[in-house]
């Protein structure tokens, strides 16, 4: 599970980097730039969710060790 979350996070980071090149700085909220911004936000959400999943698995492991 740990490797899976890292792979998903790296893919999301790649999408963020790719879509950051698609943003038109003159009009960032129109056309293709808007789609790129939405995809960047979605990628950041994925990274956040994978981080939360990793931390929750670590907490679950420590709780099982205590019992």
Image: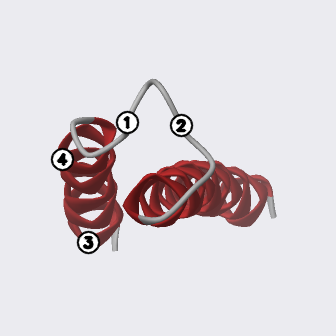
Q: How far apart are the two marked residues, 3 and 1, measured between alpha carbons?
A: 33 Å
Q: Nearer the viewer, residue 37 or 60?
A: 37
**Between tags 4 and 3, which lies in front?**
4
Q: How far apart are the two marked residues, 4 and 3, measured between alpha carbons?
A: 21 Å
Tell me the element at label 3.
Answer: helix
Tell me the element at label 2.
Answer: loop
**Between tags 4 and 2, which lies in front?**
2
The mark found on residue 18 in the picture is 4
Q: Mark 3 highlights which residue?
A: 4
Q: Is residue 38 left or right of residue 24?
A: right
Above or below for 35 versus 45: below
Q: Is residue 56 left or right of residue 12?
A: right
List x then y, in percent, for residue 52: 67, 54
Residue located at (32% from left, 57% from top): 12
Q: Nearer the viewer, residue 62 or 66?
A: 62
Q: Mark 1 highlights which residue?
A: 24
Quick check: marks 2 and 1 in contact, CB under 8 Å?
A: yes
Q: Quadrant of the C terminus?
A: bottom right
Upstream in sequence: badge 4 or badge 3: 3
List x then y, in percent, for residue 42: 56, 63
Structural crowding at the residue carrying mark 4, measured as other residues with C-alpha within 10 Å and reported as few (<14), some (14–19) or many (≥20): some
List x then y, in percent, for residue 64: 71, 66
Q: How far apart are the two marked residues, 2 and 3, measured between alpha carbons?
A: 36 Å
Q: How far apart are the two marked residues, 4 and 2, measured between alpha carbons?
A: 18 Å
Q: Mark 2 highlights which residue?
A: 27
Tell me the element at label 1.
Answer: loop
The mark found on residue 46 in the picture is none
Above or below for 14 versus 43: above
Quick check: marks 4 and 1 in contact, CB under 8 Å?
A: no
Quick check: marks 4 and 3 in contact, CB under 8 Å?
A: no
Upstream in sequence: badge 2 or badge 3: 3
Q: Is residue 58 left or right of residue 9?
A: right
């Amino acid at each position: 599970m740990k490797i899976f979350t890292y792979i998903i996070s790296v893919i999301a980071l790649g999408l963020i980097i790719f879509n950051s090149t698609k943003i038109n700085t003159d009009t960032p909220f129109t056309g293709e730039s808007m789609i790129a911004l939405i995809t960047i936000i979605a990628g950041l959400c994925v990274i956040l969710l994978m981080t939360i999943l990793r931390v929750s698995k670590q907490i679950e492991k420590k709780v099982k060790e205590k019992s």
